[in-house]
Image (cartoon, rainbow, N blue to C red):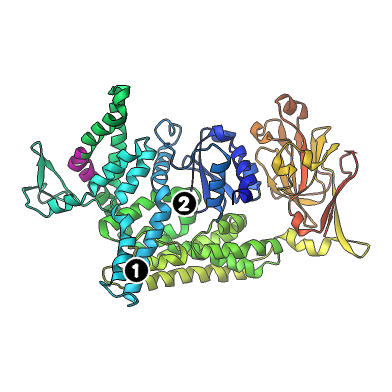
Amino acid sequence: MMKKYEELAKDIVRHVGGEANVSCLSHCITRLRFKLKDESKADTEYLKAREGVVTVIQSGGQYQVVIGNEVADVYDTVLEVSNIAGSAAKVGDEEDNKDLSPLDRFIDLISGVFQPVLSVLVATGMIKGFTALFMATGLVEQGSGMAQMLNILGDMFFYFLPIFLGLTAARKFRMNEFTGMAIGAALVYPTVSAIMKGETLYTLFDGTIFQSAIHMELLGLPVILMNYASSVIPIIVAVWFGAKVERAVAKAMPTMLKSFLTPFFTILIVVPLTFMAIGPVATWAGQIVGAAAMAIYNVSPVVAGLFIGAFWQVFVMFGLHWGLVPIMINNISVYGFDPLVVTYFGCSFAQIGVVLGIFLRTKDAKLKSISLPAFISGIFGVTEPCIYGITLPRKKYFIISCIGGAIGGALMALLSVNLYMFGGLGIFGYPTFIDPKTGDLAGMYGGMIASAVSFVFGLVVTAVMYRDAAPAEKLTVVKESVDGKAEREIIKAPLAGKIVPLEDVPDEAFAMGLLGKGIAIEPSDGKVVAPADCTVMTMFPTGHAIGLVTDKGAEILIHIGMDTVKLEGKYFTTMVKQGDHVKAGDTLIEFDKEKIVAEGFNTITPVIVTNHDQYMDVVLTDEKDVEEEANLLTVIA
């Protein structure tokens, strides 16, 4: 498996600024999530254009390279071919986050704590969901050995969630991981439940929302015992406090005693304080957050569903959904269900409806070939290939999917669909709407109706509105015929200079033809002109590269120099903008070659056909030097 993704993995590492620029790396369902020391060192535009990378998102203090379904294999390969630390590394303290906004810090914290456990959280949630479904339909008998085993498999992770979050929170706050787990274990220690069932000594805060029965005292002070199974906020706060205590204790300890006395004093201080103060206060805070969320929802469930359904995909793109995930889990912990955040559910179905509509209507072979696997992936809730590969570049259709998501969200609220367990995505999410206590299937049917409406809306509206882009339409009617046997298009030289074979370009991606077929030019001056009548599809903000689609359908990338993105636009002047139609010979970009070279950058300029796989061949000029607008490439259909 490593060989398959080795070049991609090495290229990603190189273009995020190298190993030395990476503090830590983790991954979720579709993205590599880098924590970079300096994001300005990453070549974002290159990575966005790189085959094997869907797109790049910079959000929440993370540099996210979206890969798609193969992300786990690419992640493993990156770790194998580099010295980069994986998700087990301890990152994320105040020093790492000092340049982040408060919102970014919060998002970084929540994603760092939940992301490592997300896959197991989803897996065990799916088991709980299907167990509820099997019992409600009579496939598994209540109280049978099968039912008991399925309940064990589904509940084990949620019951001991504080231990798992103790581990991930300890990594996030740079604390000893096993000390963090020990604090979590204390919260779910079985004897605590037994004590809570015993004699009540007295009651604190009687008559208020904070009313608490006291079953034990410590040094004459009341210990407020609570049920922390499946809880979220108490362990995160306790580990954050514990990390502070651990560092203070470690500073005071002699070196030879640190290894055992530091956890000794940390546990001795933090666990009692957690039971007496941190846990109860954090629990009450969670209840207040849950009550506030429910209050907002109760003002108008349909409006809340419309809002979350419409913008959920946007939240996910920028990582902002991590701010809502704790509310969802907290609601499940406090109330046993979540009616608010779950209204996002129709979004993925609206998205795949749009993609299926495009697949059915497009005549573009390349678009059709990527639409079907993206649609299949989206059925199971993984929609990044749909979003970044298909709908987002065609903005109108992304908006259609958001409207479909809004309709689904409103229906979820209208039909009172609740989420009872954090579980599967896409079609695997339906069983999570079954009330495990009553076996009521109404929520699952409501989720099916809402998602079906979202799907049909996206499909029908797209099928009615979709038209292929103009360059693709022109492709079938404008190509020339050569000797009556093949069609061809001549690509002129966009700049004058010395011809350099692509394999001699000092960049692996270009040299190996990973970005397309073509040739390179060592420029003799500082002007780039249109190589044909074409449309500017991509004008990089830094002016160092431009993407064109000729009127005959060839997709051309002109990349001025190597790593010149680092100049951040200095010495480059763009004469056109994205969307402009230009004639062959029109000036596109001017650049100061001498100053670029003086800064230490190579100005060799690849000119490549990125959609070469749609052609029989790309024939290169055999000249050693070319003048501007001389024949450079011949693209044969």
Residue 369 image position (x, y, % from top left): 66, 63
Quadrant of the rendered structure where residue 373 is? bottom right
Q: Is residue 263 or residue 257 the one in the foreground? A: 257
Q: Is residue 282 or residue 215 the one in the foreground? A: 215
Q: Which residues are magenta?
A: 272-283
Please give the residue where the numbered disc 2 appears in the rendered image: 315
Q: Earlier in the sequence, mark 2 or mark 1?
A: 1
Quadrant of the rendered structure where residue 415 is? bottom left
Is residue 163 visible in this depiction of the protein? yes
Is residue 295 visible in this depiction of the protein? no
Q: Is residue 432 or residue 163 the one in the foreground? A: 163
Residue type at the position of mark 2: Phe
> In terms of secondary structure, where does tag 2 sit?
helix
* Residues under numbered marks 2 and 1 in contact, where contact means CB atoms less than 8 Å apart: no
Quadrant of the rendered structure where residue 425 is? bottom left
Magenta-drawn stretch contains 280: yes
Please give the residue where the numbered disc 1 appears in the rendered image: 131
Residue type at the position of mark 1: Thr
Compared to 477, does 202 lie above or below?
Answer: above
